[in-house]
Image: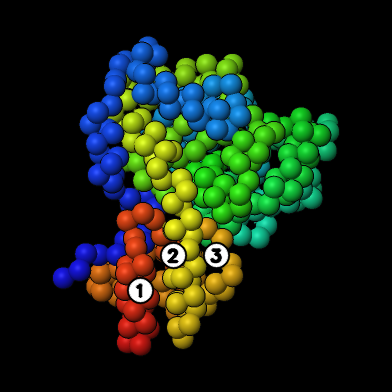
Amino acid sequence: MPPPVNLFSDTQTTPTPGMRAAIAAAEVGDEQRGADPTVNALCERVAALLGFEAAVFLPSGTMCNEIAIRLHIRPGGEAIYLHRTAHPLHFEAGGPAALSGAVLMALDGPRGTFDAATLEAAIPAPGNRYAPRARLISVEQTTNVAGGRIWSLESVRQVLEVARAHGLRAHLDGARLLNAVVASGVPAHQWAAGFDTAWIDFTKGLGAPVGAVLAGSRELIDEAWRYKQMLGGAMRQAGIIAAGALYALEHHVDRLAEDHALARELAEGLAALEGIALDPSSVETNIVVFEVFDSAAFLEALSERGVAMSSVGPRTVRAVTHLDVDAEGVARAREAARDVLAAS
């Protein structure tokens, strides 16, 4: 029996043999004391990649978001503006409110993005004592449940211009930033320019088992270390896992283009099936979102045929390509979807 096709998420990746060898050979030390050379090398590399002074290695992208929000938000009625589908709003267990006292202001816009005019309209007028104080914006690049869309560089800069005009800080949720880099050809430091903090995740398309890196000014990263300690995130000989992230930067960035090509191939195959609503031209990176008759029933039947996807709504399904899914897996996923629809 062929192995399952796991399109549930790009978080499902497993370390490649080369990555496992790099992990096994990692030079390590006490990360908490700044004595782990592999962690230090990773942080220096990501800071340079994103155009910042410093960076800190953290266990997860969620912790990157939570610490960054805490850096910018002072408890007591300050607001963060983000898209209504953004990760901190839906997938971080209320962390921004619990850890930072943040008021989350959800903005609307197509496929996980919002424009400068929408942000401008949401910010309260000066002197408004009834509204929470506008403090922070967060941009998710690429968008997640909205289908892996890439914000245009122009729209990001326009949103940042509005934020700066109102004295707001800016955070870049770069969970899949390198997907945007590969698909657009725009370097990571250009995407991150104008933001106060930014991060990249290594456990999605880059294929590492653990970790993300948050970057910013040296002052902010020094303070981020305080919150890392507070949240229990110091990791001692963390070079073991940082080595996987370094390997990913060296070997798995350019290959993200393969995931994008397979996602488009999957989208075209699914769009040809009766019972699926999907515009293949909407697929820009490695995430395919489409509509079916009933997502729960569809996914259950798909699972019985050895294919995993995820539900992001009563009729909405998400499939994500990554380094553990090849062209044969995409073909099997399409055939399984065809069989499910034919039997429904």
Viewer-side residue, 142 vs 36: 36
Crowdedness of circle 1 by 10 Å Cα count: few (<14), some, many (20+)?
some
Please name which of the two marks, 3 or 2, marks the residue nearer to the observer: 2
Residue where numbered disc 1 is placed: 331
Q: Do the CB atoms of the residues marked 1 and 2 lie less than 8 Å apart?
A: no
Viewer-side residue, 191 vs 119: 191
Sequence-wise first label, 3 or 2: 2
Viewer-side residue, 81 vs 256: 256
Residue 296 higher or lower than 180, as above or below: below
Amino acid type shown at disc 3 = Val
Q: Secondary structure at mark 2?
A: helix
Please name which of the two marks, 3 or 1, marks the residue nearer to the observer: 1
Sequence-wise first label, 3 or 1: 3
Q: Quadrant of residue 219?
A: top right
Residue 312 higher or lower than 335, as above or below: above
Q: Secondary structure at mark 3?
A: loop
Say which quadrant the C terminus sits in.
bottom left
Say which quadrant the N terminus sits in.
bottom left
Name the residue at 44% across, 70% down: 266
Residues under labels 3 and 1: Cα distance?
17 Å
Residues under labels 1 and 2: Cα distance?
10 Å
On the image, the x and y values in percent for residue 253 come to 46, 45
Residues under labels 3 and 2: Cα distance?
10 Å
Amino acid type shown at disc 2 = Leu
Q: Is residue 194 left or right of residue 266?
A: right
Residue where numbered disc 3 is placed: 283
**Outermost residue toward the right in this view:** 126
Residue where numbered disc 2 is placed: 262
On the image, the x and y values in percent for residue 121 come to 79, 48
Amino acid type shown at disc 1 = Ala
Name the residue at 59% across, 39% down: 188
